[in-house]
Amino acid sequence: MFSQLGSGSANPNKDLEVSSPPEDTISALEFSPPSVQQTFLVAGSWDCQVRCWEVEASGKTVPRAAQGMDGPILDVAWHDDGSKVFMASTDKSVKCWDLAANQTIQVAAHDAPVKTCHWIKAPNYTCLMTASWDKTLKFWDTRSAVPNLTINLSERCYCADVDYPMAVVGTADRGICLYTLEGKPAEFKRIESPLKHQLRCIAIFKDKKTKQPTGFALGSVEGRVAIQYVNTANPKDNFTFKCHRSAGTTGGYQDIYAVNDIAFHPMHGTLATVGSDGSFSFWDKDARTKLKSTESLDQPLTKCAFNHNGQIFAYAVGYDWSKGHEHFNPGKKNYIYLRACYEELKPRPT
Amino acid sequence: MLPSHISNREYKIANELFRSFNSQNTIFELRTKSNPPPQQQSQQNVVTDEQLLNQVQSDVLAALKGGMWILTCYAPFKEKPIIPGLHDLSPEEARLFIYEAKASNNIDNAISYINNHLKETRDKYEQLLKATPTVTNLLRSLYQGETIASPFTSNQNTGFGNPATSIFRSAVQNTPFQNASPSIFNQAPNTSMFASQTEAKDLFAQAANQNVFQQSQSMFPSQDTAKSIFAQATQNIFSPNTQSIFNTNQVSNQSAGIFATANQNVFGKLDNAQQNSTFPQAPVNVFQKSENPPSNVFSQNVFSTNESGVYSKMEELSAQDLEAFNSLSFKLGFIPEIAPPRELCN
């Protein structure tokens, strides 16, 4: 009874295909930080591998290296100096991949699969933040066997984001908790989710003027995104909008797809969403308008990322399990596409 | 019969919730506290049971008919608790469950487990579509922000006689994937599906006595030393170094990049070599193509409700249950854990 994504084609938006893509669904996608002169893209996958490509100005991608873990990868994060990549796995560990030496070493451990990892660079410390289905959030100096700080979560971590001095974690059963990273990490505030169903992705956005983190966008399985400010005098600033839905075939009901990832453009402050429907969209949250919608691909989009200067938008194509194991076809190829996006994400003129 | 304790603010919030589901075409539809209340309200300052039920029915129908991921919690009313008994299981958790079952040759059991879990959850959502006193009371309590027990009867015939043995139940309520209680996978009674997975090598085991910070202060010093704990962090690993995997870059043929619409091209210093470089292949892919395609778990008609399993029989009720069902509202701590009998549902 479910409509299939049969109508979409492989690359309807005519974007650039990344060479030698992962052999199973891409679960994590991150560009190198500005400290690195070249542009590298790393992707974690359900095939237990993390791969690294160099992205050339021509759009050509050159595979550079890959590393594996003992279970599927759930997240990756760059060290701020671009020398290392952290890889979080269902094998309950996080490893640090030294790119120059092409060696890995375990730097964190949990009692259950590790869902997210983020590198924190504060003025007075740096550390790795990991969050797990074991309902804990941990902070590691990466050289010690024990975390420097463990904070209990209300539930299993489903998504997290970090933009110093703010961290935010979304959990099962709609939990959201904000943390301040100033001085040392500490719980700041628990927030009631404005969405009715399971959280799937979360992304911090900055204030336009101060350039400081001021709120976050939340995506859920319900084809809806919430824009939420941390401190706002006007509750009207917070709103939700529907996306990744399509005119349904079932008696006038819309097909509802999950919002699988949200990314904010580093220069414009506009945002991209990708969904189980196989499409990506660009939005201007301040003008509350859609900047661009795209044709659906024939598979879901699982992850997206902007490079540090906002020239490149990358998105990953593959099965996201949104229709269960029945619809998993391991023979179907996974893709990562690159798109020149700087102009398309310019905010609507005011 | 309309409760007098519903505040004007709550009334407005509920109205906004109702409104938000009427517009299907607006991209940005507000769900804020400041929307004016709609005009169709017959009563002032109250939310009727019917409105609560309508809201939930609208949500549940949209979710079931729209093909939404159904293993999700559900909070029908803004800033109020989730429906008890419905908890999140993410696609990733379900996927890992299947992958690890496959790795340990337990795929059939895992699939039937997931299928049953889906059916059970779908049944629960379908129960919410019915305007029974249980559902009405549940929604009323939720709306008032009360913490309540799960209204769902666990004696439905979904193949799980004892829900406590379900490893997903434990995954939802306790630490996931560590449950060592008897699982449905009877071949391995003392280990859960996930426990049989290779344990992460704990390379920290012997390092516990060597905390690098034993002699120094905490990694979160109170003053801004601005010093990274990474002594070598300032060294650029991409500097020319014949051992580096990144050392092949040469300044050559810096053509105008397709991404280079900014003032300067950040994609400088690229090489044209290495075209045929590929990743080292992983030795084995444990997760190759699945065999035994399972029956379609998502093909059940969401509206084929089996009413007979929903109600309790009169004789199953204790005197206390009967009193609770016959009263106008449930008292906390005295809410029956079984479904009402059909006789009391009209």
Image (tube, grey):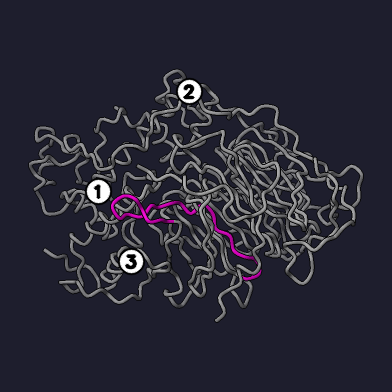
Residue type at the position of mark 3: Ser
Above or below, B331 relative to A89: below
Q: Which residue is mark 2?
A: B106
Q: Which residues are magenta?
A: A245-268
Q: Residues within 10 Å of mark 2 (few under 14, many from 20)?
A: some
Residue type at the position of mark 2: Asn
Q: Give residue B128's mark.
A: 1
Query: A194 or A348: nearer the eye?
Result: A348
Q: For the N terminus of chain A, which image quadrant? A: top left
In the visual, does B211 lie left or right of B14? Answer: right
Which numbered disc, 3 or 1, marks the residue closer to the eye? Answer: 3
Residue at figure coordinates x 89%, y 42% from the top left: B243
Output the chain of dot 3: B
Output the chain of dot 2: B
> Mark 1–mark 2 contact, CB under 8 Å?
no
Query: B290 or A109: nearer the eye?
Result: B290
Q: Residues within 10 Å of mark 1 (few under 14, many from 20)?
A: many
Above or below, A232 relative to B93: below
Kindly report the distance in space between the C-alpha atoms of the residues bearing marks 1 and 2: 34 Å
Q: Which type of secondary structure does the marked residue at label 2 adopt?
A: loop
Residue at figure coordinates x 52%, y 56% from the top left: A295
Residue A97 position within the rendered picture, expressed as x and y whole percent measured from the top left: 74, 43
